[in-house]
Amino acid sequence: MPDPIIECQDVSVHFGKKGVGVAAVSEVTLDVRENEIFGVVGESGSGKSTLARAILGLQTPVSGAISLEGRGLDPLPPKMARQDRAKIQYVHQDSGAALDPWWSVGSSLEEGLIVHGVRSADERHRRIERVLDAVGLNESFLDRYPHELSGGQQRRIGLARILVLEPQVVILDEPTSGLDVSVQAAVLNLILELRAKLNLTFIFISHDLAVVHKLCDRLAVMHLGHVVELGESDEVFSSPAHPYTKSLLDSVPRLDGPPREVRLRLKGEPPKASIGAVGCSYCYRCPKVRQDCSAATPVLADIGDGRRVACFAVHAPAGDGMNRG
Amino acid sequence: MSDPLLTIRDLSIDIETPTVAAKVIDHANVQVHLGETVGIVGESGCGKTTLLKAILGILPKTAVCRSGEILFEGRSLLDLWGTEESRRIRSCDIGFIPQDPYLSLNPAFTVGRQLNESLLELTGQGAYAELLRMLRAVQLPDPEGVLERYPHQFSGGQRQRLLIAAALARRPKLLIADEPTTALDVTTQSEILEVMRELANETGVAMLFVSHDLGVIRSICDRVTVMYAGQSVETAPADALVNAPKHPYTRMLLNCHPGRSHGFKGIPGQVASPLDPPPGCRFSPRCPIAIAECSRRRPQPLHPSPSQEVSCPRYEIDLETAADA
């Protein structure tokens, strides 16, 4: 098994105060292994992006620890933390909007290198040239402006912009949202290619489950700040264990298989993830809810083959002591 | 089959700019029969939004109709343009559900007041009873309370339900939905689609449902028209379209779906620009089975079966063998 490159141990991120605040990320424990593509899926408000921001150091967790290659990142003095965190980079959701419209592509690509202290202009140009080639563009793009690029090309430049910094871990936040399905393939193939070529590790945040299934080696399913299921993506998709994962997968409109089948669908609006809330975040609309679900919060426990699930009904199926509520 | 409720026949629309005319719709054909749900599917730039705007009569002043007609119950909407009668049709007979539920409600007014706007001729008890009926139809809990609340007090899914209620208030014969679930999470999307299906069944309203997501289209539509760069390229029953697509563009589009192909497949090339569209079939520059004839004349619609229409003379030719040859 490859070594974990990023580990999160009981990471919680809260906004606001106890009682009125929101627990955006609650006691998340996960590990991302070297050279894998790790998916994070969940609906809006599930805490995917906040978790990414915490890993980047943009959001201070109220508790828990994040480490890169076994070294803790939080207790470091800011200057050192900044150096270490240069190894983790983030690609914005809409790279086109993240590029300055007044800056040529070349200046945008160079900015990061200047900020990170690459003094030699020759060195900067060498790195930019190499990365442009890696993302399938050429030097003619250096003098262009963002509006002269297509959506797919903008995503490539967005990727190139952080790749010049030679990161080890790249966090991709919804890299294909807003792209047509005929264009997104090029971006996804590029991610696979870059992983092989540059030995990169990716954290892939997405709500497009079909893409996550195909692209990611492992994934974590988030619901209201909690990771409810984690495992190999093929296995999670073929036999989802957590009731939330099941309903999430069932909600995806399918191209193949029986149409308009009567499915187990989610009912009701999600509650707020309040700080200090007790009980499973999903118990309000879970079809398998029992009495103990609202009394205590289930922990993410191993159920074999590296699959981890946070659900009492999975840990101890009905009849094993606990009665149905 | 009964007479069509809505017929778009041979419609061409140009948007004129100071220097050049953008040919955004090119001889498009769409039909909607009473009580039928018809999907329009296509990628960015295929003209689906322009088509809806043409039906609703909300095209910009620079738009010019070059050919064809839009018939609603046998009467030409383009001829009625600007008359009191076309206002009546658009306010009473055609309902509209917009794409973004976050942008389509005024944050400064209560929901009750905004929904009331769609019931101009009713006042007092009559209007109130009608509003409650609509809110129950879209399955919002506590309909009385809903009317007193402001848009920010609702989630995205609830707001989309409000907009569906507003669209159905006048009991229209045709409901036009422009990507109504694109801004929503998958679980919310499946709930909204369920509500729309149920209402369509109960009220018998016909629907024109625009989406870029073939899975969504398949789950709600009876028939589908595929558009590419302003041309309608294929029309077929939803299942036939997904399982046995005919037009090369439809076939390639379905192959882009991650579940349908080995690896990630895209469509090489870019969508034709409406400013300078290729002559003949606009897909021909990207089509692997195109011949010289394709870029000379616009292909005439063919009928592989009575319910199917495809604008490609070479639809029987296999894409793979043609690419290898």
Image (cartoon, rainbow, N blue to C red):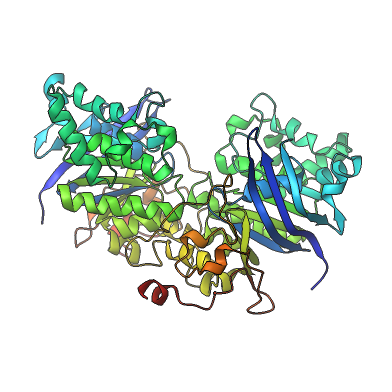
**Residue B137: horizontal and vertical position, in percent?**
71, 51
Q: Is residue A87 visible?
A: no
Q: Position of residue B63 (x, y in %)?
A: 72, 40
Up the image or down, A71 lies above or below B271; here it is: above
Q: Is residue A65 left or right of residue B11?
A: left
The foreground one among A61 and A293 is A61
B257 sits to left or right of B237: left
Q: Which quadrant holds residue B278?
A: bottom right
Q: Residue at x 17, y 35 (%)?
A: A127
User: At which x and y percent is residue B223?
Assistant: 65, 66
Relative to B320, residue B110 above or below? above
Q: Residue B84 falls in which quadrant of the image?
A: top right
Q: Residue at the spot x=52%, y=67% of the render?
A: B292
Relative vertical location of residue B76 with respect to residue A239 in this rendering, above or below = above
Q: Position of residue A285 (x, y in %)?
A: 48, 51
Q: Is residue B45 left or right of residue A12?
A: right
Q: Residue visible at 64% across and 27% down?
A: B107
Q: How many marks?
A: 0
- The quarter of the rendered structure image containing the C terminus of chain A is bottom left
Residue depicted at x 37% and y 33%: A144
